Image (spheres, grey):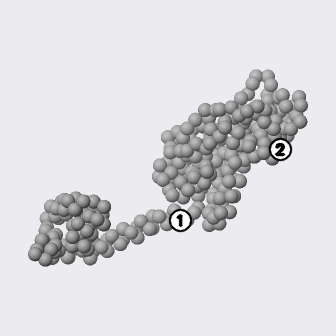
Amino acid sequence: MKRTHLPLNGMRVLDAAARHLSFTRAADELAVTPAAVGQQIRALEDTLGVVLFRRTTRGLELTPEAEAGLAPLRDGFLQFEEAVRAMQAGQSSKSLTIAAPRDVTEKWLMPRLAGIAAADPDLRFVLVAADSHGPAAAIDFTEANLDLALRWGEGPGEHEGEAIESDGMITVVAPGSGKAGEATIGWPGGPDPEGTTLVRVGDAGLAIDAAAAGLGRATVPELLAAADIAAGRLVAIGEPQPSRFGYWFVAPLPQWRQAKVRALVDALTA
């Protein structure tokens, strides 16, 4: 059944003007001018084909037609408020499903989620493994019921997104590696010089672990290597180098607008 077009803004103005019996006080409540209130009421009267207010010597009065509609109108507004609360209930569930590459989850995401969860024990996380490479658009947010994804790339692709701040790429090696540290560990997304690669692995996290095991040097995202460098498991060779690639939080616009997603992104990028 086709629904009748509802002039909701005009009805909101009618409710305020009826409560105050004053266009001026209604305008103060609605943060508009008295003239704007008058225009909305006249437009509503034209739409409905009835007169809603009359001016008398005692001031503004409601007509019987307006009186007849006020109770169901206010009941309707209460139901709108209930609908809004129902739709927002999912935001208060504090459950988030996040897709991220395995190495990013292990090296960077999990320690930060642990700290965030410790501050708010009501939070719940579902972590889904994502491909380490490829466009952000390749993530199926609907099928996996995702709230947020973390991807490696030059930008957010077709989704909304925010970059994770990083110093770029860093070359790392195990402490005291000597000549063993001259070999290169290759991974998709990292440099792979001809003739010097001793081992190739599937992602940057495995490259970091291979370097720590003494298999050579790996050039990896500084973001993922920082904790191992700080712990003394690895040492950096030279300074981090800028990269046009980096890690991004991404999500389609509806998910990106969720209060719980924005709060999580803000906490993880703080």
In front: label 1 or label 2: 2
Who is closer to the viewer here, 181 or 238? Answer: 238
Judge whether 59 appears above or below 37 on screen: below
Q: Residue furthest top?
A: 194
Q: Position of residue 71 (x, y in %)?
A: 26, 76
Q: Which residue is mark 1?
A: 92
- Badge 1 marks a residue whose secondary structure is helix
Question: Which amino acid lies under the numbered mark 1 shown in the image of this protein?
Answer: Ser
Image quadrant where residue 180 sits: top right
Judge whether 13 appears above or below 159 on screen: below
Q: Residue at x 21, y 67 (%)?
A: 23
Q: Check the picture and name the quadrant holding the N terminus.
A: bottom left
Disc 1 from disc 2: Cα separation: 41 Å
Q: Position of residue 187 (x, y in %)?
A: 73, 34
Q: Residue at x 84, y 38 (%)?
A: 174
- Badge 2 marks a residue whose secondary structure is loop
Question: Which amino acid lies under the numbered mark 2 shown in the image of this protein?
Answer: Gly
Q: Position of residue 265 (x, y in %)?
A: 58, 52
Q: Which residue is mark 2?
A: 232
Q: Residue 238 vs residue 60: left or right?
A: right
Who is closer to the viewer here, 113 or 203? Answer: 113
